[in-house]
Image: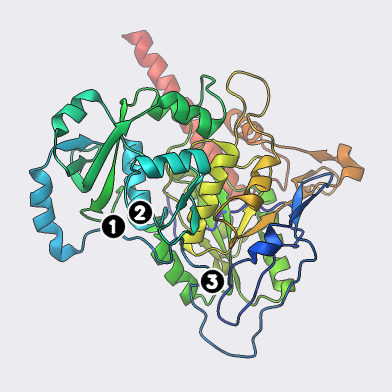
Amino acid sequence: MSLTIKLHLITSHSHHLNLNFHTLNHHPTKFTSFNPNIRSKSIYHSDPLVSIVYNTKPRMHSPSRSVQAPIKSSLIDPDGGRLVDLVIPESERASRVLEAQALPKVSLSKIDFEWVHVISEGWASPLKGFMREDEYLQSLHFNSLRMKDGSVVNMSLPIVLAIDDETKERIGSSTNVGLVGPNGDLIAILRSIEIYKHNKEERIARTWGTTAPGLPYVEEVITSAGNWLIGGDLEVLEPIKYNDGLDNYRLSPQQLRKEFDSRQADAVFAFQLRNPVHNGHALLMNDTRRRLLEMGYKNPILLLHPLGGFTKADDVPLDVRMEQHSKVLEDGILDPETTIVAIFPSPMHYAGPTEVQWHAKARINAGANFYIVGRDPAGMGHPTENRDLYDPDHGKKVLSMAPGLEKLNILPFRVAAYDTVHKKMAFFDPSRAKEFLFISGTKMRNFAKTGENPPDGFMCPGGWKVLVNYYESLQTEEGSQQAAVLSA
């Protein structure tokens, strides 16, 4: 796999951009927070395609360029005012490793390891470790954390570490523990620990809104997890690496902010996705940039930000998605000069309106001041019934009201679909509804699995070939396994 183009991603889902964004106060060098008094008066507008939150009497000011001041990555401040960085300086590493070796050990799963990565780089700022009980309860019940100064930051997903009875007993009265990665390496120290009860049913019900069987993250992580949660302050012994050929795309929030600086971005709009990029996605992202330029921004930068942690079994794997994304840029569907492709290391919960707040909050910490949201963000089909698990409009509505996200500009989009008349992806026109074809992610994957080509104009040829090759390799592998079983 060759990934030769410099990619840096911004997450977004931009179908319809009616750019009546939350009211902005523009400054020559930075954006300031929304006016909370205006936001609290927001009302819902009904639209045939999408429910959009409008502010009453919104005022838009074009960014001034009369003063030529350097543009900083403080387009938006990180939660808590500063980015958390929990990686120990190299000069202190040897002594901390010796200390960790003498401590009781807690073994981490692959997904626990991904959460260590997330916390250590500041994606969850101001969180400085796995949650203690007071943080856990605030996150679980309020989707937010209250800071010492009384301010509120969004924290919609509990970020916790589960342990079993045997590990709890082994820790005993120790106040610190060493964390051991999936490969057996010591990776961190958790200090000033607190151990408390893991009520799985309550956690599942409040995070997903259901305890129905078949929730991917629940089955992978929570069902078999221990009956206790351990929280504390995290010290990571060295930067997290996966050595999978993709580490150069895992840019931390600090690195992304520096990249935005170097490109002199005056707006950063993020697009999150866990699927291959088709031309409908590209239409949304390119249209977002066009509209931002029309508003007066000079250099809006797209952060194309695919999720890189745990995903369910039928999602396309990260390495295949990254190769596909590279083809999208090579084929000129997106402009490499105005696009940053990077991996967002978080595991996926498929928790709908609850999880989309986490996705937006993490992009604040990465320096994005615009976030594109569309239909059913972070959603999935109901695991036991033939319907969506969440109302497809609730994600964007919740983002418009979520505590701690007031400073982020939420960009709703309208639906893009395949126009069978013009043979390209286009914004859906209800007056010509019968002339549009909706190609879901499931249908797209089925096309690739069976070798059937999608309609011309659905995806760039290079990107589609990556998917076809991946599914052909799966079929070859499955055939080999079946032959081995029969010959055994």
Mark drawn on residue 75 = 3
At label 1, the amino acid type is Leu
Would residue 421 be seen by someone viewing this image from the given angle? yes
First-in-chain label (1 vs 3) = 3
Give the distance between the C-alpha atoms of the residues marked 2 and 1, in whole angstroms: 18 Å
Which of labels 2 and 1 is toward the front?
1
Q: Position of residue 375 (x, y in %)?
A: 69, 42
First-in-chain label (2 vs 1) = 1
- Does dot 3 land on a helix, a strand or a loop? loop
What is the count of numbered marks? 3
- Does dot 1 land on a helix, a strand or a loop? loop
Mark drawn on residue 405 = none
First-in-chain label (2 vs 3) = 3
Q: Is residue 246 left or right of residue 305?
A: left
Residue in the image at 64% along x and 51% along y: 401
Residue 172 vertical position relative to residue 242 in the rendered view, above or below: above
Q: Quadrant of residue 225?
A: top left
Give the distance between the C-alpha atoms of the residues marked 1 and 3, in whole angstroms: 23 Å
Give the distance between the C-alpha atoms of the residues marked 2 and 3, in whole angstroms: 26 Å
Would residue 330 be seen by someone viewing this image from the given angle? no
Residue 173 vertical position relative to residue 327 in the rendered view, above or below: above
Mark drawn on residue 86 = 1
Confirm or deny contact between disc 2 and disc 3 (CB under 8 A): no
- Does dot 2 land on a helix, a strand or a loop? helix
